[in-house]
Amino acid sequence: EAGVAQSPRYKIIEKRQSVAFWCNPISGHATLYWYQQILGQGPKLLIQFQNNGVVDDSQLPKDRFSAERLKGVDSTLKIQPAKLEDSAVYLCASSPSRGNTGELFFGEGSRLTVL
Amino acid sequence: DAKTTQPNSMESNEEEPVHLPCNHSTISGTDYIHWYRQLPSQGPEYVIHGLTSNVNNRMASLAIAEDRKSSTLILHRATLRDAAVYYCILRGTNTGNQFYFGTGTSLTVIP
């Protein structure tokens, strides 16, 4: 079974530039998450989708971050304009269900460096 | 967020058992206890979860205190591949069914 695919694996940009990350979840998984992980910290939830609808985006900095999940499959996370503090690994995860026993499957992440 | 408290780091000798503790004194009756681990340069991966009873799987065992205010992840024989950050997470209606990761316990396995 193919896992969660993310691209690009690495990205270096200047501050105030824009960047986009792509995620392809495991086939059939209705729930998709984006997490931000700053070096030395645990992952922080940015946004959760159920199919193509947003369930929780309370921790997403909406002035610069946006995410979409068209057709309830792939998802894109965009940052515009990037700040130095956005340097982090962006992790995508998917789950077959929203219930509190569902396992999350993570991708390998996209590492962003903002100079 | 429903809080969990874990030691920042632990060490274990290879092939010895490892007991990773987690305190969650504010746990509610519907919160499940999940453990994930994160190997270097990888995304977190599921280890085990439970509600009230102790649980075993091929990776580990989860021992849950009777009052559910603490739990222990048990790796029966640590290997070098078990060196990772281990996260104890509560998930349930008290957390909006979300996974909120803390800083976890960094496990070092000594050959």
Image: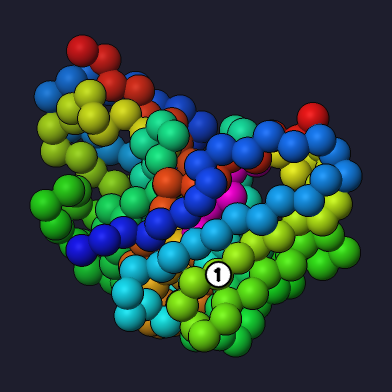
Q: Which stretch is magenta?
A: A88-92
* Image x and y of residue B24, in percent: 49, 57
**Prevailing secondary structure of the magenta residues:** strand
Relative to A19, say whether B95 is above or below: below
Q: Is residue B94 above or below residue A21?
A: below
Q: Is residue A69 above or below residue A21?
A: below
At x 63%, y 39%, the residue is: A11
- Mark 1 surroundings: few (<14), some (14-19) or many (≥20) residues within 10 A: many
Q: Is residue A89 magenta?
A: yes
User: Closest to the observer: A60 or B82?
Assistant: A60
Residue B79 falls in image quadrant: top left
Three-letter code, disc 1: Ser
Q: Residue B25 colored magenta?
A: no
Of the pair A90 and B35, the residue shown nearer to us: A90
The answer to whether residue B101 is left or right of residue B58 is right
The residue that disc 1 covers is: A75
Q: Residue furthest top?
A: B111
